[in-house]
Image (spheres, helix red, strand yellow):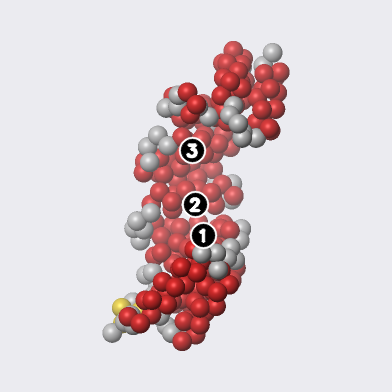
Amino acid sequence: MERNGRQAWPPELSEPLREVDRLRRGGRYTSALALARELADAHPEQVRVLVEVGLTLGVWGRQPEQALPWFDRVLALAPGHVATRYHRSLALARLGRHAEAVEGFTQVEAAGFRKALVVHMKRAESLIALGRWTEAEADWTAALAEDPGNPWLLEQRARTRVRAGRTDAAEQDLTTALDAQVGEAVDPELLHARGVLRLARGDVPGARADFDAGLAALRVGDPPALLEALRQGLRDAR
């Protein structure tokens, strides 16, 4: 029996594949890859086995270029294997092949991939690399629809909006993110970013307040560059 190019699964392969995963998680990457390749040589048309070789190379081994042929083999056998198309798109993005990655993520989205939030985030990153700001903003907006109010997503959309020349909308995103933060949770980086936008449009008191608040919110472990940026912001706002 075959489904979408996939052969019936031999139960005896389940335990070896679990061993591949145990080896990877235990830090024994070389052994995991050797076992995965051995299984693929013995079962060259078993989609799950080929996928695991690709994931071992691309995710655990951080070798996206070597992972791509394995993902291509999977899709030749099972064109509808959406998770593999997603991981192939990730590999393309890591290699700087962003136009191809965007096309892949779009196909994944159209197929109804269950991790819609991640697809929007990753496609936005590739769109930014291509300078396609409006499309990237749309993806950050779609990601926020999946995870409303997420401060990190708001910050990413704000940065994209700045690049697109929509500074007022960017400032509103940063304000929305900051409004949800209190006490030690206040992010000084967001305060710095909003201070820069306020200073650029001539709101010197507002910018100064943000830079002061950012300095007060600095935590142990924050990068020295952020401290200096906040201090420079205050000097510029005098």
Q: Residue at x 50, y 45 (%)?
A: 136
For the residues labelled 3 and 2, the Cα–Cα distance comes to: 14 Å
Q: Nearer the viewer, residue 195 or 188?
A: 188
* Residue 4 location (% of width, % of height): 33, 77
The earlier-in-sequence mark between 1 and 3 is 1
Identify the residue at image location x=55%, y=68%.
28
User: Where, by quadrant of the figure, is residue 147 drawn?
Assistant: top left
Which quadrant of the rendered structure holds the N terminus?
bottom left
Quickly name the residue at label 2: 122
Disc 1 element = helix
Q: Tag 1: Cα neighbours inside 10 Å, few (<14), some, or many (≥20)?
A: many
> Which is more toward the observer, 203 or 94?
94
User: Residue 152 bears which disc, if any?
Assistant: 3
Q: Label 3 is placed on what type of residue?
A: Trp
Q: Which residue is mark 1?
A: 90
Question: What kind of residue is marked 2?
Answer: Lys
Q: Is residue 52 above or below residue 145?
A: below
Q: Residue at x 45, y 58 (%)?
A: 105
